[in-house]
Amino acid sequence: MSRLFLVPTPIGNLKDITYRAVEILATVDIILAEDTRHASKLLKHYNIRSVLQSHHMFNEHKSVESICNRILSGTTTALISDAGTPGISDPGFLLVRTCLEKGIPVETLPGPTALIPALVNSGLPCERFCFEGFLPHKKGRKKRLTDLESETRTMVFYESPFRLVRTLDDMASHFDHDREACVSRELSKVFEENMRGSLSYLSEHYKKTAPKGEIVIIVAGKKE
């Protein structure tokens, strides 16, 4: 039976992809991509000529049924995101759940994701942690941060460079200005940076130095 493959793609350095991932992308009938223009660069680099189809948060509800029907009819399909593992703060959950409901096998390959390198590299305890993804921009943001005030595990967040300073300030207000944290950006790329310090220090730093690129924030948990 045909199945859905979830294939992690590099978060920066194009060499950070497994042999198996390249093999599957080269042999499936269709690759579902969050941004086909972005995906084309990766496929061209590895001379992969499988058909690309757009699959993102704005069209996944409309296309999920037709995708599943094609898989059931024998079309081998892979899902990739712009970077990292599909489904982690990226489209993927709805398709996976629908495939499983229809009895379609789902196979997820191990591979790149930004949260683990950032966590391990932060120097903060990583034997227990919680992944919070992106904070809400407006509704629910204050409640989410309030709920996390008593969290004792190390916390991992994704953030946009345009909202980084605001988020650090909000965290400082809820968690403590002196709470240890690390901001990792451009992981695996030429200008990778891991900036460590208190939330207030990091906020002041990025107020003076505008951040660029994909960002992971690691925040120490509340001391027990």
Image: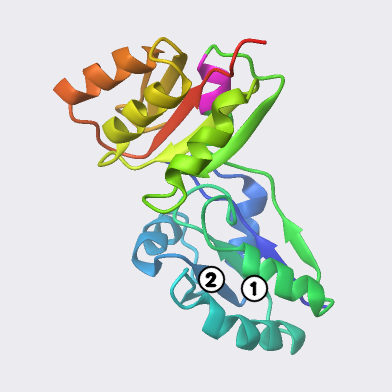
* Residue at 51% across, 34% down: 146
User: What is the C-alpha distance between the residues marked 2 and 1?
Assistant: 7 Å
- In this view, the residue farthest toward the left is 208
* Residue at 58% across, 20% down: 120
Q: Decide which of tag 2 and tag 1 comes sooner along the chain.
A: 2
Q: Give residue 184's position: percent from left, percent from top.
A: 41, 26
Q: Secondary structure at mark 1?
A: strand
Residue 132: which quarter of the image?
top right
* Residue at 71% across, 23% down: 128
Please give the range of residues in magenta: 118-122
Above or below: residue 220 compared with residue 90 = above
CB-based contact (under 8 Å), mark 2 and mark 1: yes
Please state which amino acid type lies under the numbered disc 2: Leu
Q: Could you classify mark 2 by the number of other residues whose Cα lies within 10 Å: few (under 14), some (14-19), or many (20 or more)?
A: many
Give the total of numbered labels. Answer: 2
Q: Is residue 1 left or right of residue 23?
A: right
Looking at the rendered structure, which numbered label has been put on residue 32?
2
Residue 119 is inside the magenta segment: yes
Which residue in the structure is indicated by mark 1?
Answer: 77
Residue 46 is inside the magenta segment: no
Q: Is residue 50 left or right of residue 45?
A: right
Above or below: residue 49 compared with residue 158 = below
* Residue at 52% across, 50% down: 9
Q: Give residue 72's position: percent from left, percent from top.
A: 76, 85
Above or below: residue 136 compared with residue 176 = below
Q: Evaluate whether residue 10 shows in this view.
A: yes
Looking at the rendered structure, which numbered label has been put on residue 211?
none
- Front position in the image: 116 or 141: 141
Q: Could you classify mark 1 by the number of other residues whose Cα lies within 10 Å: few (under 14), some (14-19), or many (20 or more)?
A: many
Q: Give residue 166's position: percent from left, percent from top.
A: 29, 34
Please state which amino acid type lies under the numbered disc 1: Thr
Instruction: Give the prevailing secondary structure in the magenta stretch.
Output: helix
